[in-house]
Amino acid sequence: MPKFCNNGHQMEDSWQLCPYCQRTGYQSPRGAASLAQTHLETDSLAQTQAAPPLAGPRKTVLLSEAIRKTALVGWVVVMDGDQKGEDFRLHEGPNTIGSAPDSDIVLKDQTVSAKHASIRYKDGKFFLSDLDSSNGTFLNGLDECVARVELNDADILRLGAVTLKFKAL
């Protein structure tokens, strides 16, 4: 007949201490009644900052759907400022550009509005749209602010004081 410790771990007949319980430093008092009294102790601060439970069950997404939704179609490269040399990928559909953390392309510059502009790829064409920004969106060094314009490969964009180079695939 096999030998078990108080926590239910199977042991060799010659062992006096359970290697599992000893390894964790937990020695349970004898009897099953004491196990029912075990509880988890947490500090009150951790309880108040706990994340709310998820609204529903998680859903697995097919890889083919995820790839289809995020096909890489181009990119922009920052040409000046603190982010000089940093590149951002453009995907099918709208790509928002701004200083807000939830933008697709986050530019860390005070002259860039939270939701400054958008580059949309649809039907093989790219369109740059200004999203009513404070400092305007400019194309290829022109002094006139654009509202919506079609982009071509190697165009130079200026959002506030930040210059970007656009590259289409």
Image: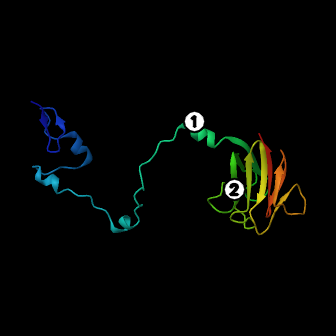
Residue 133: image x %, image y %? 75, 66
99 relative position to 41: left or right: right
Q: Which residue lies at the image location 62% right of the left edge and 39% below the top edge?
A: 68
* Front-most of residues 149 and 166: 149
Specify the label residue 64 is tagged with: 1
Q: Quadrant of residue 146?
A: bottom right
Q: Quadrant of the C terminus?
A: top right
Q: Which residue lies at the image location 65% right of the left edge and 63% below the top edge?
A: 100
- As helix, strand or loop, the secondary structure at mark 1 comes to helix
Residue 41: image x %, image y %? 27, 61
Q: Quadrant of residue 112?
A: bottom right
Residue 121: image x %, image y %? 74, 47
Q: Which of the marked residues, 2 or 1, is nearer the chain's N terminus?
A: 1
- As helix, strand or loop, the secondary structure at mark 2 comes to strand
Q: Which residue lies at the image location 84% right of the left edge and 52% below the top edge?
A: 156
At label 1, which amino acid type do we have? Ser
**As displayed, is residue 85 above or below residue 20?**
below
Number of marks in the rendered image? 2
* Front-most of residues 36 and 151: 151
At label 2, which amino acid type do we have? Thr
Specify the label residue 96 is tagged with: 2
* Front-most of residues 35 and 138: 138
Residue 49: image x %, image y %? 41, 65
User: Few, some or many C-alpha atoms within 10 Å of disc 2 (few <14, some 14-19, many ≥20)?
Assistant: many
User: Few, some or many C-alpha atoms within 10 Å of disc 1 (few <14, some 14-19, many ≥20)?
Assistant: few
